[in-house]
Image: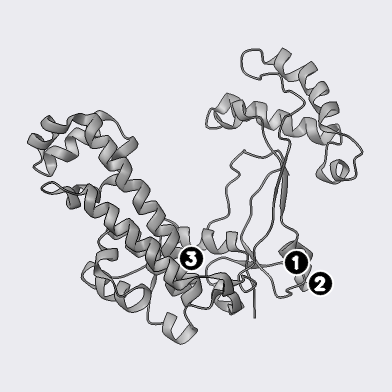
Amino acid sequence: MAFITKASYTQFCKEYEIEIDDNRLLELFKEYILDDEEAFKIFNKVEIRSLLTQTVILLDEGERNKFVFKKKEYKGVDERKDNLDYIFKIGGRLCYHIDRNCKKLNGGFVNFNTPAELSEKKDDPEIQKIIQELRNWFVINGFTVERYKKKEFNVGQLVMRYNYLFPVKYKGICLPLNENYNLLEEKKTEVVGKTDVSKFNYENTLRKLGDILAERYFMCNFDKSYLLSKYNYLYNKSNEEITQKMNELGMGEKLSHMGVDGVRRFLEGCYKLKSKAINILSEYIKYKYNFENKEFDPQFLEQYNFTACKSCCQ
């Protein structure tokens, strides 16, 4: 059997959705997630599919085979794209592990952060060139994670050499770093099948969800407000997009009364409540489907472009 990290599980869920008729969403939500129609109403169709996909991946093989995974735009879990937020490139196919003691499975994520003023503009081709130059500079100077952990250099030494070069060469683009620069990014790896769900409090979870439903009921106190709440993702969009949606919903008069800023505040409030509810149900799904003991058939994972960890196979 195979094991995957939570990061890989999350990536898998992002790349796939199960293929279901819209008319069955409520039925499946109540059957596999939570028998609560009011909770169902918080989410739009895309979000319900996402929650169901998280669930189906964790089902036993026989039950999972009742569903068809719909590939989003491309085939298989695509190779991870380098997002340029870190000095050392992250990419390649997702891995599964056959040895629970594999160092790569339990070693966590460690990398150096790209300076914020560069990572924030990483879509700019010119900035991408600077980031690549910076990456090469790290390698040439031997600024590796291994040497840093062995205390063969410190942040102050790196910052001093960086400030002599990049802020001078790219004035107005690269800013001088200070000695408090957050160089190292380190995250503990969490493995599917090693999660301690004994701490999960079912009653407390339902109470939190009930609080969200009550707050939503209080907020949605005008005509078509529940319908409008489904478009909460528009809260950070342009005034024109919000106005267009209000008119499409036949809520032009309400827009005149509330103003775009008022509608935006309503949408943002709904978005925050929805996000809390998604987090609560995602944790509940892990609890309900015995996430702590989950093992996967390697063939199932390979079907979706996972590859075996080389360290495990040696």
Where residue 52 sits, quadrant-wise, is: bottom left
Q: Which residue is mark 1?
A: 310
Residue nearest the viewer, comparing 279 with 249: 279
Q: Which residue is mark 2?
A: 314
What is the crowding at mark 2: few (fewer than 14 residues within 10 Å), some, or many (at least 20)? Answer: few
Q: Residue at x 57, y 47 (%)?
A: 81
Q: How many marks?
A: 3
Q: Is residue 24 left or right of residue 187?
A: left
Q: Earlier in the sequence, mark 3 or mark 1?
A: 3
Residue 216's label in the rendered image is none
Kind of residue at badge 3? Glu
Q: Which residue is mark 3?
A: 283
Residue nearest the viewer, comparing 264 with 62: 264
What is the crowding at mark 1: few (fewer than 14 residues within 10 Å), some, or many (at least 20)? Answer: few
What is the crowding at mark 3: few (fewer than 14 residues within 10 Å), some, or many (at least 20)? Answer: some
**Front label number (3 vs 2):** 3
Q: Quadrant of the N terminus?
A: bottom right
Q: Residue at x 74, y 75 (%)?
A: 99
Kind of residue at badge 2? Gln
